[in-house]
Image: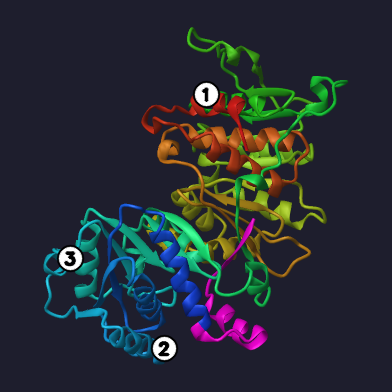
Amino acid sequence: MEKIFADTRKLDERARDVFDLTEDLMMENAAIGLMQQIELFPEVKSAAIFCGGGNNGADGYALARLLQEKYKVIVVEVIPASSVKCVEQKIRCQRLEIQIINFEGQQLNQIVCNLENLAVVDCIFGSGFHGILPDEILKLVEQINQLNCVKIACDISSGLQFKADVTVTMGGQKIQLYTERGKDVSGKIVVAPLGLCRQKFESTCYTNKFLLNYDDAKLPVRKKSSCHKGNFGHAVIAGGEKIGAAGLSATASLHFGAGYSSVITEQIINFGNQENDLTFELMTSKEIPSNATSFAIGPGFGRNSNLFADYLNVAEEKNLPVVLDADAFYYESIDGFLSKRCSDSICLPTVLTPHPKEFAALLSNCGLGRFTTEEVLENLDLCVDVFCRNHPGIVLLVKGSIVTIAVKLKSENDVFIYKNPWGTNALAKAGSGDVLTGLINGLLAQNYSALDAAITASLVHAKCSESENNFSLTPFGIIQNLDKLNF
């Protein structure tokens, strides 16, 4: 697990104040970090470094000095140097007779036409930039994106528009890199040290945001041989209009270690088929079984059932951990259930797993505002913070290409946010979310805490989506990949 920061400029300031690292020293280390990534591409023979006027541009000028001997280097001054350090670094390049081209009025194809085996480095804007790129710069970035060359971003993709193969982020992880837009433009993310180890660098500032890695998963490994199915819980899910969704979720629970897995349904169904006989292991019931140890509702449930509130009341009476997903977020009665859970002296494990559109419905039904899906995506961490502060103890998992998991523990003043950047677009398929619900439900059945269940299931879900043919991987294929886990 790594720390993530909203603004690392405070870290830079503290590094100067606490550890006496000069700005020049940190810039030299930033430039070394960029150079080391360029050197990993042996085919690169030339570099075009596009510089802004601030300290991100200064890093670019410093990089040009380091590359001069080994590569053909040009600096493109997109914005005139304005910060003190940027001006200093530019003067150093001028004294070394490094070619500096003023971009104004220039055509990109003319600038790079004589550069073979090219690497382009984006040093226009860093993490301090907010808003929309000016039209002229946006047009330039879009043209650069079309070039067939190695692309490296310094600190962060400018305006999250430059499509990098590698982003070298300085000192520590930035929250902007772990947004929906950030994932598509950042490429491989590498943290460059600025003159001291990350632990010391990051120790000077507090953060409530963390980046998850695969080794943060706590797998339900069975260590005792003398055991029986009752030792591993009974995961139950409510079936509804689309019974296959509940069946898929229940199968995931069973494959992830639950001793029993049941679907509540009034229908007479046969889960087995010629292609897959594993689902014969599922059980059905007309009500929540007496030995249930966790309960899920939402996948394929439908939005007009009179049973929704009844099921939640029974789950509350039985003190069951609960996972809510999909259609569950469109019921107005969800607010009363969540409020009751929050008011308990010890909050029973509760995990909510909406995608952004469902999260918008959840916020509305909980009286926390009306938002479009786009507004939720643009202000995700803020929306997550508002929800969790109003529902302490409840774990929220918002699905997306970057999964956001958050909780406000009753013993803490802050909302803790965890980002899962892993997984592939194979998960963009109907049924994938049902599998995730089942994984979480299976872990809750085995007495996991809500936070550990959400984090572990999310990471495993992501890992199981990694396939050579993402287009052909089905949700049941994700379940089958549980057998191949190699963390």
Measuring 67% from the left and 23% from the top, which residue is drawn there?
A: 262
**Amino acid type at mark 1:** Ile
C-alpha span from label 1 to label 3: 58 Å
288 lies above or below 308 = above
Q: Identify the mark nearer the N-term, 2 or 3.
A: 2
Quarter that holds the N terminus: bottom right
Instruction: Mark 1 or mark 3: name the one nearer the start of the chain.
Output: 3
Is residue 177 shown to the viewer in this render? yes
Q: Position of residue 146 (x, y in %)?
A: 21, 56
> Looking at the image, which residue sits at the far bottom?
84
- Which corner quadrant of the image does residue 473 belong to? top left
**Drawn side of residue 322 relative to residue 424, left or right:** right
Mark found first going from the N terminus, 1 or 2? 2
Q: Tell me if residue 148 is in the magenta stretch.
A: no
Residue that numbered label 3 is attached to: 112
In front: 447, or 136?
136
Outermost residue on the front side: it is 69
Extent of the magenta region: 1-24
Q: Which residue is mark 2?
A: 85
Q: Are marks 1 and 3 in contact (CB under 8 Å)?
A: no
Q: Amino acid at mark 2?
A: Lys
Q: Mark 1 against mark 2, which lies toward the viewer?
A: 2
In the image shown, does 91 or 349 lie closer to the viewer?
91
Q: Quick one: SS at disc 3?
A: helix
Q: Secondary structure at mark 2?
A: helix
Q: Is residue 47 left or right of residue 24?
A: left
Residue highlighted by disc 1:
243
Check disc 1: other Cα within 10 Å, few if <14, some if 14-19, many if 20+: some
- Image quadrant assignment for residue 345: bottom right
Element at label 1? helix
Note whether 349 is above or below 106 in the view shown. above
